[in-house]
Amino acid sequence: MKRVVLLALFVLGLAFANPAFAAEAAGNAAGSTLFFAAIVFGAAVGVGLAALGCGVGMGHATRGACEGIARNPEISGKLTVTMILGLAFIEALTIYALVIALILLYANPILPKFLNVLGLGG
Amino acid sequence: MEEPILFLCLILQKLGIPSGEYFYHHADKYGILAKIFAPHMVYGYFISILLIVLAILGTRKMEFIPSGLQNFWEFVLEALYNFTYENVPHGEDGKPNIVPLVYPLIVMFALFILFSNFIGLIPGCTCPTANLNVTLGLTLITIIYYHLLGLRFKGLGYFKSFMGPIIWLAPLMIPTEIFSHIGRIISLSVRLFGNMMSKELLLGLLTFLAGPFFAPLPIMCLGVLVAFVQMLIFIVLSLAYFAGAVEEEH
C-alpha cells in the first residue's frame, strides 16, 4: 500500500517538474496557466485533505457513541447529544478549509499583484 | 450565476430605497442608504421586529396556567435557563453566581441565531448570519463580555491566569494563551458563517445544475439540522468561555 502511494506521488512530481510544462508556462504570453492551475488545485486538494481528516475524526466519535449506547442504553439521549456536539466541532474544521478555498477562488488577494507583475494591470 | 431575488429588498426598492445585492456591491455610488438597507441588514431588522412582536403577543394577558404562545415561550425560556444553569457557576460553594449576568444574552443569541438560520430556508430570503459581518459582531459581543466578566470577578488578577499554573513557565504560556484567545474570535465567527454560507452556496449550485424544485430538497433537510446544531454550538461555546473566565485555576 505504501509503495503504491509513493509511486503515485513520484509520477505526480514528474508530471509537474516536466521541463516542457515549465517552458510552456514561462513562454506563455500571459504566463498565467500555471498560476491559475495552482490556485484551483490548491483549493480542491485543501478541502479534500480537510475532509479526510474530519471523516476519520467523526468515525471515531460515532464509534465511541455506539459503544457507549451498547453498554448502557438508558442514557442514549445524553450520548447522542454529546456526539452531535462533537461532530459539529469537527465539521467546523472542514468548513474553515472550505472558507480558505472560497477566498482563493473568488476573492484572491494575490491575483492583483500577480497581474501587475505580468503587466496586465488587473 | 445571477444575483438572488430577495422579497423584502424588492419591496424596499419599489419604495425608492436602494436596497439589494447590486446596490450593496456598488455602495459608493448609492450612498450610505445602500449600506443601511443591505440584504443582511434588512433581514436582521425583520427578525428583530418579529421577535419583539412575538414576545409582546405572548405576554399580553398572562395567565397562571399558560396556553398558546405563552406556553411556547415558557417552554423555550425554561429550557434555556436550565441549560445556562448547568454550564455556568451558579453560586454554590463559594463560586460567583453569574447566571443573571449571562442569561439574557444567551437568550438573545439563541433566538436571533435560530431564527436567522431558519429564515434562510425560505425561498426569497437570505440568512443574516450568512455574512461574516453579522457573525463577527455577535462574536465580538461574547469576547468583550467575557473579558469584562473576568476583570469584574477577579480584578487585575485576571491577567495572572494567563501566566499558567507555574510562575516560571510564564514566557511560554503568555503567547500561547494570547494566540488561543485570538483564535477563539476567528473560530467562533467563521464556524457559524461558514456553515450558513456553504449551505446557501450548495443550494444555489444544486439549483443551477439540477433544476429548480426537487434537487435542493435533501440539502434543505440537512440545512434544518445544521441550523439548529450551529445555534447550540454557539451557545455552548459562549457559556464555556464565560465559565472559564470566572472560575479559579485548579
Image (cartoon, coloured by chain):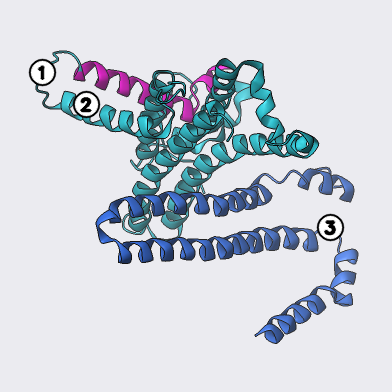
Chain colours: A blue, B cyan
Q: Secondary structure at mark 3?
A: loop
**Residue appearing at x 48%, y 61% in the figure:** A58
Q: Secondary structure at mark 1?
A: loop
Residue B66 picture quarter: top left
Label ID, residue A30: 3
Q: Is residue B39 a member of the stretch shown in magenta?
A: yes
Chain bearing tag 1 is B
Q: Which residue is mark 2?
A: B74
Q: Horizontal and vertical percent for residue A67?
A: 37, 66
Q: Distance from label 2 to label 1 (Cα)?
A: 11 Å
**Residue appearing at x 53%, y 45% in the figure:** B194
Residue B222 in sight from this viewpoint: yes
Disc 3 residue type (three-letter): Ala
**Vertical position of residue B224 compared to residue B61: above or below:** below
Chain bearing tag 3 is A
Q: Secondary structure at mark 2?
A: helix
Q: Distance from label 1 to label 3 (Cα)?
A: 76 Å
Q: Is residue A90 a member of the stretch shown in magenta?
A: no
Badge 2 density bin: few <14, some 14–19, many ≥20, Cα 10 Å: some
Disc 2 residue type (three-letter): Glu
Residue B11 in sight from this viewpoint: no
Q: Are marks 1 and 3 on the same chain?
A: no
Q: Horizontal and vertical percent for residue B44?
A: 42, 26
Q: Which residues are magenta?
A: B31-58
Task: Please name whichever residue, B156 or A63, is drawn nearer the observer in this view of the structure.
Answer: B156
Q: Horizontal and vertical percent for residue B38?
A: 50, 26
Q: Is residue B27 left or right of residue A33?
A: left
Q: Are marks 3 and 2 on the same chain?
A: no
Give the residue furthest to the front: B93
Label 3 or label 2, whichever lies nearer to me, is: 2
Q: Which residue is mark 1?
A: B64
Q: Quadrant of the N terminus of chain A?
A: bottom right
